[in-house]
Image (tube, rainbow, N blue to C red):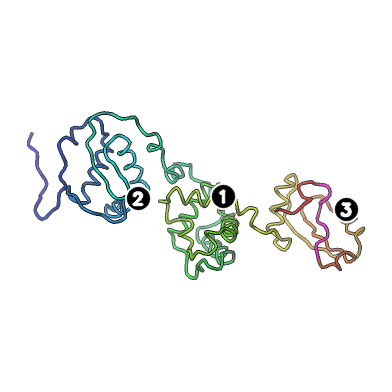
Amino acid sequence: MKIIHPDTSGGYFTKVPNDLIENEILTPAQKITWMQIASVCRGYDCDIPGGVKGIAQKLGVSYFTFIKSVKRLQSVGGAIVDRNECHLLIPTEKVLLDEEADEPCVAEKVAKEAPRKPSGVSQKESMKQIEEAWNQHKPDSFMLMDSKMHLSAFIAVETQAKRLKVERPDYPEMIERVLAACKVNDWYKGKTLKIHNLFGWGTDIEDKKFQNIEKLYKDGKSAVKFSFADDKAVLKWYNEAWPQYSWDKVERLTLPTVDEVYDHDTSTRKGGTVYVYYAEEMYEGKAVFYWTGQMVNRKLRYTPA
């Protein structure tokens, strides 16, 4: 069979040993990774700034996918990579596989999850809600979102939210919780960050960013200050603590005496409306004295931490 070689005039080619092509230890995918690395310097020794990330940028491929391929190549003896050098090798015997190298990255796991059902909130509406939540709750040192949110930043927020099982209508709360944790975190609170610095860019997000957002989201639950002035927070609290009723409205009442507060609560405690009470004889009616069902439902006895 005649083999027709591509036109080589004016082009660049990578030297690849026949031993690599014939190697029975490396898989086809591992051989491609080997050749990708070699191609950066056209088969000769050279210096690429930025380590593996610099090589991925030079190749124009996803770093987080490429680093996994490089780790798989290392695990079978096809390369030795440290901070300063990458030695390409042709293995002569099989080695014990590194299970961690074959473990898909978080971004790959999220991408394989089933698509979520429509939430009723459009992308445009959600982007605006995220912008407002970011600007309202960010630490002082973080950058304002003073222009339209970039699509890649929105996709990163959606990807992070998908992993945390947060739906679009709750993105503002997720942003608030993450930023509340940033405000009390010694590392984050003094940094000058934009939203993509925190959440990532597109779907190609490094594992560390997923882990950071997950921790901030969990820490933020206790960092967000609950307020009876926030109807949404009040209703969320009640619907979680007393789900057998459908709470959809908050009303604030100032009554003359404590007894009148209790009487009103007893007669209206049927779900639907959450009443927040101020008693004139207590604190001159300037502070919340009681709220619907406080002494009946133990989950409502104290406000969220």
Task: Tell us which disc is closer to us: 3 or 1.
Answer: 1
Q: Which mark is residue 166?
A: 1
State the image coordinates of residue 241 (x, y, percent, origin top left). 73, 47
Q: Is residue 103 magenta?
A: no
Residue found at x 7% / y 36%: 2
Task: Tell us which disc is closer to us: 3 or 2.
Answer: 2
State the image coordinates of residue 289 (x, y, percent, origin top left). 83, 60
Tag 3 near tag 2, CB within 8 Å: no
Mark with earlier residue (3, 2)? 2
Q: Which mark is residue 63?
A: 2
Residue tagged 3: 267
Cα distance between the residues tagged 3 and 2: 63 Å
In the rendered structure, which segment of residues is drawn in magenta?
287-296
Identify residue type, mark 3.
Answer: Ser
State the image coordinates of residue 158 (x, y, percent, origin top left). 49, 53
Question: Quick one: SS at disc 1?
Answer: loop
Question: Quick one: SS at disc 3?
Answer: helix
Identify residue type, mark 2.
Answer: Tyr
